Amino acid sequence: MSYLTISGRKIYYEEYGTDKAPTLVYLHGGPGESCLTYTYQARKLGETFHVISFDQYGVFRSDAVGDESLGVNDLVQMTEQMRIALGIESWIPLGHSFGGMLALVYAHTYPDSIDAVIYDCPMWSALHTARAIAEATLPCFEQEGIAEQTALCRRILNSELSSREAFEKAMSIDMNETVQRYCHVIENDRYNDYINTHIPDPMVTEDCWGKFADFRKKLFLSEDFYADYIPYLADIAKPQLLIVGEYDMTCGRYEQKWFADNAPDGKTEILSGCAHLTWFEQPEKYTDIIVKMFSNHK
């Protein structure tokens, strides 16, 4: 197991491919999920790229969060410190879900450190992700006649809630089995089978699992988690690729249109039949899209 020490904290990371190839840095979602579930895709991308994949500070195999506060910009700054510590001149951030927020803020904050940026079903705004979730689940609640949940979704969509209020309400939406089927959410058994098949020896100790809650609690208390970063897309001068599943509930129609209309060198790939885990649902196509994207921008 490999670690870097960044600002006195141990950060777990994995490395694939050769450092003679362009570098991708994978920023996982969750928030707080870890890079473990991306292992298979990191290996596949490592056949073309030099891939760095790591557990964010406070998550899983990296050091737990201490008494200090933790926000989006703290994680972004630590990512830049990792680039410097690894001796990488520039790289391509690839952010999934919450990691898409980190990728965008990183690209905006450190434009000279990137060659391109890839967003995979990203969360660029807590407010607009909350609205995307409500928009996706509302028809199911209406069809099932569930009045309380219907009213909750409509309030998120139609009221002037703050970003924090809308996100907190979206997290309370009842994602029951009927809603999950309606929204094409991956079944847990199928996902667990994937993990067991492709990651036979994750080398995970018991203490890894307890870090998730503390990480999320700290992050959800930070003001910068609730900022709207969507306008940053217009300022990124390097190529930007948006990969989004047809049924994704994190990056909704508003965000996709904003990207299409405003990203200067932006390209969108919508994976039909996929929801939020595009790299799991269509792994070969996912890899091909990223490889072709880079070959077009050498």
Image (spheres, rainbow, N blue to C red):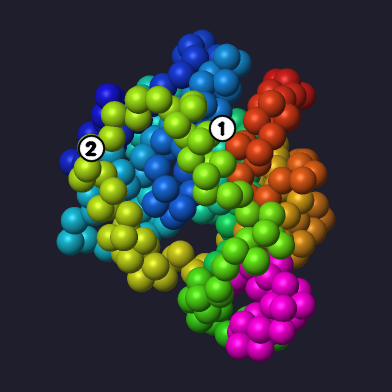
- Residue at 49% across / 14% down in the picture? 17
- Residue at 71% across / 84% down in the picture? 145
SS majority, magenta: helix
Left-right relation of 254 to 160: right
Callout 2: helix, strand or loop? loop
Specify the quadrant that holds the N terminus.
top left
Which label's residue is closer to the chain start, 2 or 1? 1
10 Å neighbourhood of mark 2: few (<14), some, or many (≥20)? Answer: few
Callout 1: helix, strand or loop? strand
Residue hosting label 2 = 205
Type of amino acid under label 2 = Thr
Percent position (x, y) of residue 227? Answer: 52, 68
Q: What residue span does the magenta drawing correspond to?
A: 127-155
- Residue at 42% across / 48% down in the picture? 33
Quadrant of residue 277 within the rendered picture: top right
Residue hosting label 1 = 92
Above or below, 78 relative to 54: below
Left-right relation of 110 to 5: right
Specify the quadrant that holds the C terminus.
top right
Kindly identify which numbered label has been placed on residue 119. none
In the foreground, 127 or 89: 127
Percent position (x, y) of residue 215? Answer: 32, 57
Mark-to-mark CA distance, 2 and 1? 30 Å
In the foreground, 239 or 271: 271
Quadrant of residue 8 within the rendered picture: top left
Percent position (x, y) of residue 179? Answer: 65, 66
- Is residue 229 among what the camera can see? yes
- Residue at 66% across / 73% down in the picture? 134
Type of amino acid under label 1 = Ile
Above or below, 21 relative to 85: above
